[in-house]
Image (cartoon, helix red, strand yellow):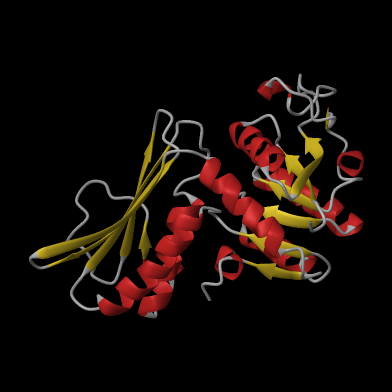
């Protein structure tokens, strides 16, 4: 049997954190080696798998160096400010990083890229295997439908999501724009209200829905004369993100540095 992948989970008491811990404990080739939560969390000092009614022997803690002392990898689905703090310590300790956090500024993305010179990082706005296959399909569709089709992206998430549009929707827009030879920053339209005038055919529109417990729905519409093509992905469980994250861990077993995406993990480049 191959060596166990020793994994720490950031934000371990959140919805995604719980899903990640459950996935790590269920995987034959993975070992939970650390569980991190914010300072002041009532879960500090408690076994990280207590929510499952079992003991993992890993205690939830807020001190980063202590929480990462036995880990080879950190999976991070938190918020940009938290991820950046984790990045600095991972770089110092040589811990490889899987980043599912979204909403980074260009400056923060540059810091992550700089850190990847020292540690191996997989960073993706969506760790779902299905979503990343959809991104490949969107590239193909955009190239084939480059003339005479208006493009709109609609996404829906739960009421607790703090950034909009979602990182996945933005990634879909980037893939489509790149395939069309456009700059998303120049052609994206993020909201419409009032008398907007006729639609500019060179734009890519985004619409955001927030409510309930929607895990994540994304639809890209290519709308032409007499027909409409829709490419849709719907997540019914965060388990898909957790399983994609473990595939990213396994991919990172080989490289010692570098910045990778899920297309690298899945061999889609």
**To which quarter of the image does residue 131 belong?**
bottom left
| Residue 42 position in % (x across, y down) | 76, 19
Which quadrant holds the N terminus? Answer: bottom right
Compared across the picture, whether 1 is left or right of 171 comes to right
Front residue of 14/247: it is 247
Direction front: furthest residue = 1
Residue 7, image x, y percentages: 78, 47
Image-based side of 56 in relation to 165, left or right: right
**Where is residue 89 shown, x and y percent of the image?**
86, 51
Name the foreground residue: 124 vs 166: 124
Q: Residue at x 55, y 55 (%)?
A: 125
**Residue 132, image x and y in percent?**
48, 61
* Left or right relative to 259: residue 204: left
Q: Is residue 108 something that shows in the picture?
A: no
Q: Nearer the viewer, residue 57 or 15?
A: 57
Q: Residue at x 72, y 62 (%)?
A: 121
Looking at the picture, tell me which residue is in the foreground, 215 or 184: 215
Does 167 sit left or right of 217 as displayed? right
The answer, for residue 6, to whether it is visible in the render is: yes
């Amino acid at each position: 049997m191959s060596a166990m992948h020793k994994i720490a989970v950031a934000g371990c008491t959140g919805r995604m954190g719980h899903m990640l811990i459950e996935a790590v404990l269920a995987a034959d080739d993975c070992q939970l080696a650390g569980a991190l939560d914010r300072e002041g969390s009532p879960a500090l000092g408690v076994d990280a798998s207590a929510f499952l009614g079992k003991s993992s022997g890993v205690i939830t803690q807020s001190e980063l160096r202590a929480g990462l002392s036995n880990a080879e990898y950190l999976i991070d689905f938190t918020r940009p400010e938290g991820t950046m703090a984790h990045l600095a310590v991972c770089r110092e300790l040589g811990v490889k990083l899987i980043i599912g956090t979204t909403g980074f500024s260009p400056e923060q993305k540059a810091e992550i890229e700089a850190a990847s010179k020292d540690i191996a990082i997989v960073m993706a706005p969506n760790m779902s295997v299905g979503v990343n296959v959809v991104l490949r399909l969107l590239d193909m569709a955009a190239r084939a439908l480059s003339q005479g089709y208006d493009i709109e992206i609609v996404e829906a998430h739960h009421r607790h999501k703090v950034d909009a549009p979602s990182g996945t929707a933005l990634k879909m827009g980037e893939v489509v724009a790149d395939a069309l030879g456009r700059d998303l920053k120049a052609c994206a339209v993020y909201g419409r209200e009032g008398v907007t005038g006729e639609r500019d055919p060179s734009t890519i529109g985004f619409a955001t829905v927030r409510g309930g417990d929607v895990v994540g729905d994304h639809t890209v519409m290519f709308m032409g004369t007499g027909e409409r093509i829709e490419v849709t992905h719907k997540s019914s469980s965060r388990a898909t993100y957790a399983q994609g994250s473990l595939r990213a861990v396994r991919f990172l077993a080989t490289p010692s540095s570098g910045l990778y995406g899920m297309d690298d993990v899945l061999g889609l480049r």
